[in-house]
Amino acid sequence: MSITVNGRKQLELFQNVQQLLKHYGLENRIVVVEVNQEIVMKENYEMTSLSKGDVVEIVHFVGGG
Amino acid sequence: MLKIADRTFQSRLLLGTGKYPSFEVQKKAVEVSQAEILTFAVRRMNIFSEEQPNFLEQLDLTKYTLLPNTAGAKNAEEAVRIAKLARASGLCDMIKVEVIGDWHTLLPDPLETLKASEMLLEEGFIVLPYTSDDVVLAKRLESLGVHAIMPGASPIGSGKGIINPMNLKFIIEQSTIPIIVDAGIGSPKDAAYAMELGADAVLLNTAVAGAKDPVRMAEAMKLAIDAGRLGFEAGRIEEKEYATPSSPTAGMVTP
């Protein structure tokens, strides 16, 4: 077990946010990433490393009123 | 023209993007509504299943202003977290503050809404709180410096229309910022009525998305809002208890 992504424990290891997004095919999608409740801006994806126990949220816009 | 903070809009209809039967219908409805401001919610992405199409990613984002909401927030802190996530998309800096205080009626929590609005103003957002039709709360929000107030006509998705026109009128009359009637609109008559009361705009979702024909209802709402606004600007006649003839009472051909 390494990190939790959107509520699920992940077995894979990802060096940074960039790699994580690539793994899920999200590089070109409109998403926002939070690591341990801190927002990671797009320009910092590569330099934001992930380590054991990190909690990642990947959110997007859905229909709503 | 609708002016929110430093932005101007031709359309006085703000359209929600939830619960449409299909993206195709939704796209057409958005187009005929001529809405320029579209609301969205922020949610966890379902990254573990097959790729799901996303409505926002199919929009020409240069044509629309996004108004994300903080729906799902139970207190001010959660609302601020959601608002920051929305803004980090780089697509918007407006936020509809929505802090629900009762899950049965979906009525907003006035105290948390006030607190969230204050925190978000400090963070530099353009803040549009969704509130009940409480006149004093509206006054308090305006004195905080919010950029528009969005009182509900009746509970979200109820389609019950304007339950308390008197309160809405009081809010409209006392405010110097835009009043956008949000939630509870059921039919074009409700939207026209809100505009006739002097509202600056109407925000609706279910009334269009849930209609038998959402595309035609989107057009109907647009026309109703235009008609209501025009009627308000034209200035309606006074109501009288008894009849007054429309035809001259002199020069009758019959004795």
Image: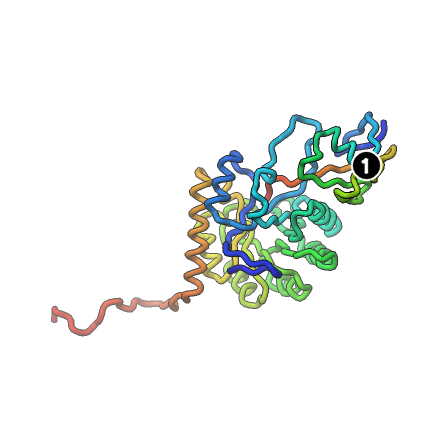
Residue B216: percent from the left, percent from the top? 42, 42
Residue at horizontal 71 percent and vertical 57 percent from the top: B124
Query: In the image, is B98 to the left or to the right of B11?
Result: right
Q: Is residue A9 above or below residue B187?
A: above
Q: Is mark 1 on a helix, strand or loop?
A: strand
Residue at horizontal 67 percent and vertical 44 percent from the top: B72
Query: In the image, is B217 to the left or to the right of B246?
Result: right
Q: Which quadrant of the rendered structure holds the C terminus of chain B?
A: bottom left
Residue B106: percent from the left, percent from the top? 62, 47
Query: In the image, is A3 to the left or to the right of B46?
Result: right
Query: In the image, is B163 to the left or to the right of B144?
Result: left
Mark yes or no: residue B81 visible.
Answer: yes
Mark yes or no: residue B163 visible.
Answer: no
| Snapshot quadrant of residue B235 | bottom left
Residue at horizontal 58 percent and vertical 47 percent from the top: B62
Residue lying furthest right in this view? A52
Circle 1 residues within 10 Å: few <14, some 14–19, many ≥20? many
Residue A21: percent from the left, percent from the top? 74, 33
Residue at horizontal 73 percent and vertical 37 percent from the top: A58
Q: Is residue A37 above or below residue B7?
A: above
Q: How many marks?
A: 1
| Snapshot quadrant of residue B126 | bottom right
Instruction: Name the residue tied to disc 1.
Output: A55
Q: Is residue B249 above or below residue B5?
A: below
Residue B6: percent from the left, percent from the top? 61, 61
Label 1 marks a residue whose chain is A
The amino acid at mark 1 is Val
Viewer-closest of B90 and B104: B90
Q: In the rendered view, how is the structure colored?
A: rainbow
